[in-house]
């Protein structure tokens, strides 16, 4: 059984409790982060904490504890659970208050929960095989730059696509791909340029995105940050997605049509290797 963290306590997962009046539960009034773990160490930790601060700030939510304390909590959870490879999930909610659309008094105590998830990240059958994705309308609210727990649309769309034989969805707004259900989206054009949507309130600024684009630039691969269409996806040489839990993961099919030769492409493969190598070296 796992040990999880709830508001200062480390408890067995079946003893952890949160109020039914918690605003994360009632309103999805909560933000989260997922940090991956390799060799028992945290990947891109400062980036995740910086994004957490930003998400909290955008929603006028108080930080429950300092970044130093968050690092201590992450490390203690790793050791309590002997986690070598997987993820740590962190969630901050605005706290518990009588149900009301108005935010509660500023002195309401936020709730902070963290737990570990064991997962094989390096050996990934999906990364080996390549993902089949479907396009769907991006019907999320237009502040996808804030990492809220309001994930129902993405979860619903991915589940429906899965029921239809696909692995994931790419979201499309005004004819252009925004991002994946829980990842950033990329194509590699015929001339070898990597194209991914520019940062804006319409997408999450992926911590992995930032690191992978840096790897691409170091490899002297041209990068364009701009919107791209489904036609461009269909005509691309290859495609891939990035996230903390999947690193770089090739996409081989869009709406039933093969992308490139329908196999994981060399650019995605190379970036995956380099990202893993650099992340391992820099893990804390
Ligand atoms: N976009 C969305 C909508 C996501 O949920 C995620 C993963 N949380 C990402 C992009 C990728 O972000 P990161 O690389 O920080 O995991």
Image: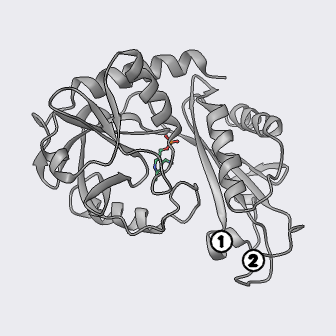
Name the residue located 60 percent from the left edge and 18 percent from the top edge.
282
Residue 63 is marked as: none
Residue 271, by quadrant, is top left
Q: Please name the residue that numbered disc 2 is placed on.
A: 21
Residue at 42% over, 46% down: 183
Total marks in image = 2
Mark 2 to mark 1: distance in Å?
7 Å
* 15 sits left or right of 29 in the view: right
Q: Residue at horizontal 76%, vertical 34%?
A: 71
Q: Secondary structure at mark 2?
A: loop
Location of residue 103 by image quarter: bottom right
- Give neighbour class at mark 2: few <14, some 14-19, many 20+ (Cα, 10 Å): some
- In this picture the colour scheme is one colour
Question: For this rendering, which residue is in front, 89 or 12?
Answer: 89
Determine whether the residue tagged by mark 1 lies in a helix, strand or loop. helix
Q: Are marks 2 and 1 in contact (CB under 8 Å)?
A: yes
Give coordinates of residue 234: x percent, y percent.
14, 46
Q: Which residue is mark 1?
A: 25
Does the numbered disc 2 mark a residue whose Cβ is under 8 Å from ligand 1? no
The correct choice, above or below, for 97 with respect to 46 in the image is below
Name above or below for residue 231 compared with residue 110. above
Q: Is residue 174 left or right of residue 260?
A: right
Where residue 154 appears, as percent x and y from the top left, is 41, 62
Q: Is residue 155 above or below residue 205?
A: below
Near mark 1 (Cα within 10 A), the count class, few <14, some 14-19 or many ≥20, is some
Name the spot of residue 28 as percent of width and height, x first. 61, 69
242 vs 230, nearest the viewer = 230
Q: Is residue 139 left or right of residue 279?
A: left
Q: Position of residue 192 (x, y in %)?
A: 21, 26
Q: Nearer the viewer, residue 163 or 235?
A: 235
């Amino acid at each position: 059984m796992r040990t999880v963290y709830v508001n200062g306590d480390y408890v067995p997962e079946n003893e952890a409790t949160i109020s039914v009046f918690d605003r994360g539960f009632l309103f999805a009034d909560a933000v989260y982060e997922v940090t991956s773990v390799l060799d028992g160490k945290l990947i891109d930790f400062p980036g995740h904490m910086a994004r957490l601060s930003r998400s909290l700030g955008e929603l006028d939510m108080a930080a429950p504890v300092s970044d130093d304390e968050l690092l201590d909590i992450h490390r203690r959870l790793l050791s309590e659970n002997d986690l070598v490879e997987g993820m740590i999930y962190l969630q901050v909610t605005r706290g518990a208050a009588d149900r009301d659309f108005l935010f509660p008094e500023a002195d309401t105590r936020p709730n902070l929960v963290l737990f570990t998830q064991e997962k094989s990240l390096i050996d990934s059958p999906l990364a080996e095989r390549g993902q089949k994705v479907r396009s769907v309308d991006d019907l999320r609210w237009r502040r996808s730059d804030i990492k809220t727990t309001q994930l129902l649309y993405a979860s619903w769309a991915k589940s429906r696509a899965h029921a239809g034989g696909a692995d994931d969805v790419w979201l499309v707004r005004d004819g252009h791909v925004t991002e994946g259900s829980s990842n950033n989206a990329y194509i590699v054009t015929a001339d070898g340029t990597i194209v991914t949507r520019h940062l804006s309130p319409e997408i999450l600024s992926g911590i992995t995105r930032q690191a992978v684009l840096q790897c691409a630039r170091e490899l002297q691969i041209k990068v364009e940050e701009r919107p791209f269409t489904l036609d461009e996806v269909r005509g691309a040489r290859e495609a891939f997605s990035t996230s903390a839990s999947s690193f770089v993961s090739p996409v081989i099919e869009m709406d039933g049509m093969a992308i490139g030769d329908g196999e994981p492409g060399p650019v995605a493969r190379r970036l995956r290797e380099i990202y893993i190598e650099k992340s391992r070296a820099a893990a804390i």
